[in-house]
């Protein structure tokens, strides 16, 4: 194998390693969400601690992937398509880290709510349903990333409004709940924060899908309706 072939082969290995790390980080973040929703349900101190402590692992994964991307750019001088992959990955891991932050918020809210002995949590079923939707969105986004599938990414982006609708429904019900019994205001407000965290998780999953489209097509679809006409000269 000549020197050029060796460099190209090593470059492919480096890129595949980065993609693998992103998916591993995604699995870690998914576990954070599931544990945080379970801790909200049960008040389990072990689960709450696991989520809060696990945030350090998420932060470490983000830093290591960013470092790997920087090293690849410095050593390999990637061409346009590979550079898009590295740029997209850097943004994706930022969104994954922020999903971890939202999971930690849910765990902290769970600790506060259960610490007051709030055993009957209003709208818990709705929170669980919204959480399940958010986890499903994240899984689909990561699967689209693994397969570099822009069509699945487009579907996911279009469906993001389902989580937004769930959030608005939870808020409406909790406002009614607070009006009927003002003693529930503190707990209800904390549950709204939990619902908002879940909505943000869905937003970050959508952001991951947008980056997949950018990686594959070179098109930035952030803040642009998917059915909008492409700009002249933009990649197909």
Image: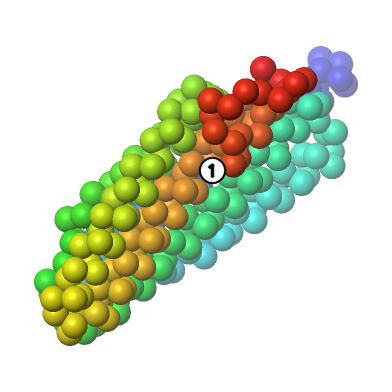
* Mark 1 crowd level (few <14, some 14–19, many ≥20, 10 Å Cα): many
Picture layout, residue 7 above or below residue 167:
above
Seen as rendered, the residue at the extreme right is 3
Viewer can see residue 36? no
Q: Residue furthest top?
A: 1
Q: Position of residue 72 (x, y in %)?
A: 77, 39
Instruction: Locate residue 13 relative to residue 117 in the image: left or right.
Output: right
Q: Looking at this view, is 188 or 119 the one in front? A: 188
Foreground pick, 67 / 153: 153
At 43% from the left and 28% from the top, the residue drawn is: 155
Q: Where residue 203 appears, x then y in whole percent?
A: 47, 48
Residue shown at the point (13%, 76%) measured from the top left: 180
Q: Secondary structure at mark 1?
A: helix
Q: Which residue is mark 1?
A: 207
Give the side of residue 149 with respect to residue 66, left or right.
Answer: left
Residue drawn where x is 14% and y is 79% of the image: 181
Say which of 128 and 236 sits in front.
Answer: 236
Q: Position of residue 108 (x, y in %)?
A: 36, 73
Q: Is residue 71 visible?
A: yes
**Which quadrant is the C terminus positioned in?**
top right
- Residue 80, quarter of picture: top right
Picture coordinates of residue 41, whole percent (x, y):
20, 64
Query: Coloured how?
Result: rainbow
Left or right of 132: which side holds 90? Answer: right
């Amino acid at each position: 194998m000549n020197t050029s072939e060796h460099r190209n082969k090593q470059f492919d290995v480096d890129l595949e390693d980065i993609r693998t790390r992103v998916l591993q980080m995604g699995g870690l973040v998914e576990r954070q969400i599931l544990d945080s929703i379970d801790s909200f349900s049960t008040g389990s101190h072990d689960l709450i601690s696991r989520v809060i402590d696990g945030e350090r692992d998420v932060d470490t994964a983000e830093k290591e992937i960013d470092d790997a991307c920087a090293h690849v750019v410095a050593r390999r001088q990637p061409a346009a398509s590979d550079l898009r992959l590295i740029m997209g990955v850097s943004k994706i891991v930022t969104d994954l880290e922020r999903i971890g932050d939202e999971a930690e918020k849910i765990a902290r809210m769970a600790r506060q709510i259960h610490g007051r002995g709030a055993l009957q949590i209003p709208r818990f079923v709705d929170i669980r349903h919204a959480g399940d939707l958010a986890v499903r969105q994240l899984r689909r986004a990561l699967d689209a990333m693994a397969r570099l599938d822009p069509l699945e990414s487009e579907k996911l982006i279009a469906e993001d409004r389902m989580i937004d609708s769930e959030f608005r429904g939870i808020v409406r019900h909790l406002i009614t709940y607070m009006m009927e019994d003002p003693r529930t205001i503190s707990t209800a407000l904390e549950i709204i924060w939990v619902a908002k965290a879940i909505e943000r998780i869905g937003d970050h999953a959508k952001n991951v899908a947008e980056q997949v489209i950018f990686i594959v097509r070179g098109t930035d679809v952030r803040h642009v309706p998917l059915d909008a006409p492409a700009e002249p000269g933009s990649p197909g």
